[in-house]
Image: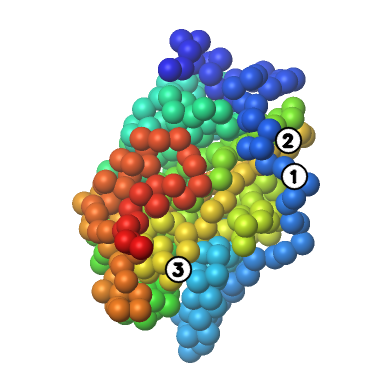
Amino acid sequence: MTSTAPVVEKLLSNGHNHLHLQDKYVFPPGERPDMSQVCYLYRFPVIDLKDLDGPRRIKVVNEIKRSCEEDGFFQIMNHGVPETVMKSMMGIAKEFFEMRVEDRVCLYSEDPRQAVKVYTSFNVNKDKFFSWKDSLRHPCHPLEEFINSWPQKPTLYREVAGIYAKEIRVLVLRLLAAISEALGQDSDYLNAIFGKHTQEMLINYYPPCPNPDLTFGVVPHSDPSGITVLMQGDVSGLQVLKDGKWFAVEPIPNAFVVNLADQLQVISNGRFKSSEHRAVTNKTTARISIPSFYGPSFDSFIAPAASMVDEEHPALYRGYKFEEYMTAFFGQTLKGKSILDRFKIEVNP
Ligand code: OGA
Ligand code: NI
């Protein structure tokens, strides 16, 4: 159980200048980021979406397909979300975490299922070691249903984040159509499986950390939804696992990071990968990242697509309601792709 310390003391964004790490942030030797092993030279594909809706669509779809098969990770440019909308969102996110902590604590919750909340680490009642971040999380779709539950401060928060969330949805729907085609289906395929759809926004705030070698911003994990579109700002920290090695993802101005999440690995019967990633902290600069998680509604049934299953490719996962997956996800601490593994079909040797 967590301490009964005042909420202001539980948040990292409490205005204190952190001079050292409390014990709960210090990961054991063997479980730390080990920055000396991180590769900084590789660049994951940057896919230009300029031609996605024109005569050269097939070429772009094939690039997306290759990235989905290899790592489930790529960046996109010419994605259609105006630069001004991205900048305003990053600006209001910064304001949110820089306003006095008293204006944030009213949203603090330790309940992983709480829809709108400010919290620290991932799940403080389950995390053995804490991650060096505070977050704001809230649902975004349908917008009219949720916008009135969003933070009231800063005053422009709802307006700015509302415009951003709508733009992200338009972009994601275009990506889902392309990924459906990459799966050999018609463009409406994933849209239909996702039912009423869910879209959630997270704002991660990583304050400067006195000792980045000892802790994480976010521990290694894959995202549980369908697809994640992340604005990572201009401070690096994101790393992706590729062939057993961690690769740093340097920010590209105005690009979005896209990573496939677990539901697409299941639906594609393992042909597409959900990407395993993590974030590390740094000593000098606060970092803000804004992932949008997009996926099925809770009542959607998720299973490997019939067209992906045959004698040579037996079903790797059992079918389930998405709600069951999310209950498993929020009931634990964050740990690699461990939830996905729970839905694997056991093959008898
Ligand atoms: C996440 C995440 C990475 C980052 O919040 O799920 O992976 O760069 N964040 O902050
Ligand atoms: Ni993630």
Task: Residue at 26% x, 46% y: name it.
Answer: 323
Residue 57 visible here: yes
Image spot of residue 75 (x, y percent): 59, 64
- The quadrant in which the C terminus is found is bottom left
Please name the residue that numbered disc 3 is placed on. Answer: 272
Secondary structure of residue under mark 2 = loop
Mark 3 or mark 2, which is nearer the start of the sequence?
Answer: 2
Residue 288 vs residue 163: left or right?
right
Task: Residue at 70% x, 65% y: name it.
Answer: 43
Extreme-bottom residue of the structure: 55
Please name the residue that numbered disc 1 is placed on. Answer: 35
Mark 2 or mark 1, which is nearer the start of the sequence?
Answer: 1
Q: Foreground: 246 or 87?
A: 246
Image spot of residue 204 (x, y percent): 55, 39
Disc 2 to disc 3, how far (Cα)? Answer: 32 Å
Callout 1 crowding tier (Cα within 10 Å): few <14, some 14–19, many ≥20: few
Give the residue type that dot 1 points to: Met
Callout 3 crowding tier (Cα within 10 Å): few <14, some 14–19, many ≥20: many
Q: Foreground: 163 or 324?
A: 324
Q: Quadrant of residue 281?
A: top right
- The quadrant in which the N terminus is found is top left
Disc 3 to disc 1, how far (Cα)? Answer: 28 Å
Mark 1 touches mark 2? (CB < 8 Å): yes
Please name the residue that numbered disc 2 is placed on. Answer: 213
The answer to whether residue 3 is above or below residue 79 is above
Secondary structure of residue under mark 1 = helix
Task: Residue at 47% x, 20% y: name it.
Answer: 105
Mark 1 or mark 3, which is nearer the start of the sequence?
Answer: 1
Q: Foreground: 174 or 304?
A: 304
Image spot of residue 132 (x, y percent): 61, 31
The answer to whether residue 62 is above or below residue 225 is below
